[in-house]
């Protein structure tokens, strides 16, 4: 069995889906295809969820926009009117409409997962119907019937044991079987939908590869493979031909968004090779991630995380930050399910960076303020350089206003300043004065 994963960009419109069909047509043997939501669907669904949560009427308009996007795509894709598919798509939209026709009654993360999952349900229905239409007979599988996870909504943990038998049964490799399923989503022990974290479809593909003892997994991207920096921010990037698992884990951990951080571990556990290949140039080799040592020479790798918030906490009266303080802070961070991108502590302060997009940051700050002075700085960038050299360090420090620098043997992290630190408590007053 080989596992393919197509992300949102690779199914973003009708010609992209035709290209997916071409790539699938060139595969040999049994294939399981994991597909993400189309284009920017998940972001739009997040907007719908936020609008509905805030009880704004725009939620309905946004949902209508999403529906029109999907209907337009379908009409572009099929030469004949696909009655059955349109009925299925209409049913999915009716379910979504029903969900936003009344206020959320359950905790936010639960409600979020029940709605956000429709992106993948829609995309897989469409891609599967198209493949069948062009003669690539495939079986659409609702991954929630076999992939079990816990009820940590928006960041669910896979229940490997209970999933294994079901996955093996659903995706059994018969001669040249072709399965098509959703990334990102799973089912909790009560049968409710849960999700594996944003951009988690790579992880789904790796879970299936592990459970099915796949021969290989390929992630199809709009780039030639894993590059030594994000081409959206850096020129003259170089493709990495070979990356050992451990290095890939490090790169994704520091934020190389080309692979989801949880993807590598299941593959490494069974030595399943992972290729990152271009859906634009599928005949090119791409990047191979596998077991082995570092390729020589080591290239510096640059990873940029934009829109970071730096939170600084200081105990009142300049007392030391002790283990009890750290325990308290990390318990709150865990409670809100917030991911830390950077941490540093000194005798009298603890600082950490989180993504601007995290919706629970303000709640966390409010709780922290009960015990500490809290300072917040928005609009920062985290720049990580793996395998840095003196020249790369000089370049980064000359081109950016560096607030904090942290180095170990292989990795240097720079927090680059974009705005002024002001105490969170004074934020409102300051803004009002400025207006
Ligand atoms: N080190 C890197 N190598 C290649 N691409 C990278 C890297 N870091 C970030 N990217 C970005 O990742 C993008 C592809 O990932 P993504 O947009 O998440 O695709 P998809 O949603 O289809 O999975 C590329 O277009 C590129 O801008
Ligand atoms: N659609 C989900 C899951 C995913 O992995 O998407 P993509 O493969 O397009 O990054 C998201 O956007 O988070």
Image (cartoon, rainbow, N blue to C red):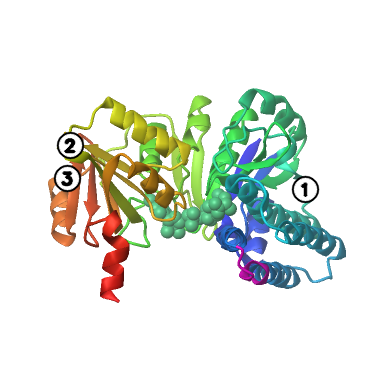
Q: Secondary structure at mark 1?
A: loop
**In the rendered image, which residue does mark 3 sit on?**
389
Q: Which x, y percent locates residue 351? A: 26, 43
Identify the residue at image location x=45%, y=40%: 261
Disc nearer the start of the sequence (1/2): 1
Q: Residue shown at 74%/68% (left/top)?
A: 74
Q: Residue at x 27, y 59 (%)?
A: 426
Near mark 2 (Cα within 10 A), the count class, few <14, some 14-19 or many ≥20, is some
Label 3 within 8 A of ligand 1 by Cβ: no
Residue 254: image tag: none
Q: Which residues are magenta?
A: 55-61
| Residue that carries the numbered disc 1 in the rendered image | 138
Image x and y of residue 429, in percent: 29, 65
Mark 2 close to ligand 1, CB under 8 Å: no
Q: Nearer the viewer, mark 1 or mark 2?
A: 2
Label 1–label 3 contact, CB within 8 A? no
Task: Report the residue marked by disc 2.
Answer: 348
Quadrant of the drawing holding the C terminus:
bottom left
Q: Position of residue 140 (x, y in %)?
A: 77, 47
Of the two numbered discs 2 and 3 in the rendering, the one whose residue sits closer to the viewer? 2
Does 280 sit above or below residue 33?
below
SS for callout 3: loop
């Amino acid at each position: 069995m080989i596992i393919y994963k197509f992300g949102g960009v690779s199914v973003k419109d009708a010609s992209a889906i035709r290209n997916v069909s071409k790539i699938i047509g060139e595969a040999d043997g049994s294939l399981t295809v994991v597909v993400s939501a189309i284009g920017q669907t998940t972001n739009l669904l997040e907007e719908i969820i936020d609008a509905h949560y805030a009880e704004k009427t725009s939620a309905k308009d946004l949902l209508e926009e999403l529906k029109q996007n999907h209907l337009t795509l379908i009409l572009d894709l099929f030469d004949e009117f696909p009655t059955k598919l349109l009925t299925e798509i209409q049913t999915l939209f009716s379910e979504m409409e029903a969900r936003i026709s009344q206020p959320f009654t359950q905790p936010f993360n639960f409600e979020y997962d029940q709605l956000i999952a429709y992106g993948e349900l829609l995309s897989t229905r469409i891609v599967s119907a198209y493949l069948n239409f062009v003669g690539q007979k495939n079986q659409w599988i609702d991954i929630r019937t076999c992939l079990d996870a816990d009820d940590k909504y928006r960041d669910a943990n896979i229940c490997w044991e209970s999933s294994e038998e079901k996955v093996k049964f659903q995706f059994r490799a018969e001669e040249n079987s072709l399965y098509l399923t959703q990334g990102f989503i799973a089912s909790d022990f009560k049968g409710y939908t849960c999700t594996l974290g944003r951009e988690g479809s790579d992880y789904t593909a790796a879970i299936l590869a592990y459970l099915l003892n796949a021969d290989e997994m390929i992630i199809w991207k709009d780039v030639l493979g894993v590059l030594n920096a994000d081409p959206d921010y850096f020129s003259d990037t170089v493709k990495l031909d070979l990356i050992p698992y451990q290095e890939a884990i490090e790169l994704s951990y520091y934020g190389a968004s080309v692979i989801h951080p949880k993807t590598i571990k299941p593959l490494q556990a069974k030595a399943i090779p992972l290729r990152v290949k271009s859906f634009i140039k599928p005949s090119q080799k791409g990047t191979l991630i596998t077991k082995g040592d570092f390729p020589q020479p080591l290239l510096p790798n640059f990873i940029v995380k934009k829109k970071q918030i730096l939170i600084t906490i200081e105990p009142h009266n300049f007392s030391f930050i002790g283990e009890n303080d750290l325990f308290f802070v990390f318990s709150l961070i865990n409670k809100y399910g917030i991911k830390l991108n950077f941490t540093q502590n000194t005798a009298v302060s603890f600082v950490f960076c989180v993504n601007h997009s995290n919706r629970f940051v303000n709640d966390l700050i409010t709780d922290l303020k009960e015990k500490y002075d809290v300072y917040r700085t928005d609009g920062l960038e985290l720049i990580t350089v793996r395998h840095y050299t003196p020249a790369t360090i000089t370049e980064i420090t000359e081109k950016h206003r560096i607030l904090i620098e942290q180095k170990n043997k292989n990795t240097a992290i720079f927090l680059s300043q974009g705005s002024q630190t002001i105490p969170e408590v004074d934020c409102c007053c300051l803004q009002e004065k400025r207006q």
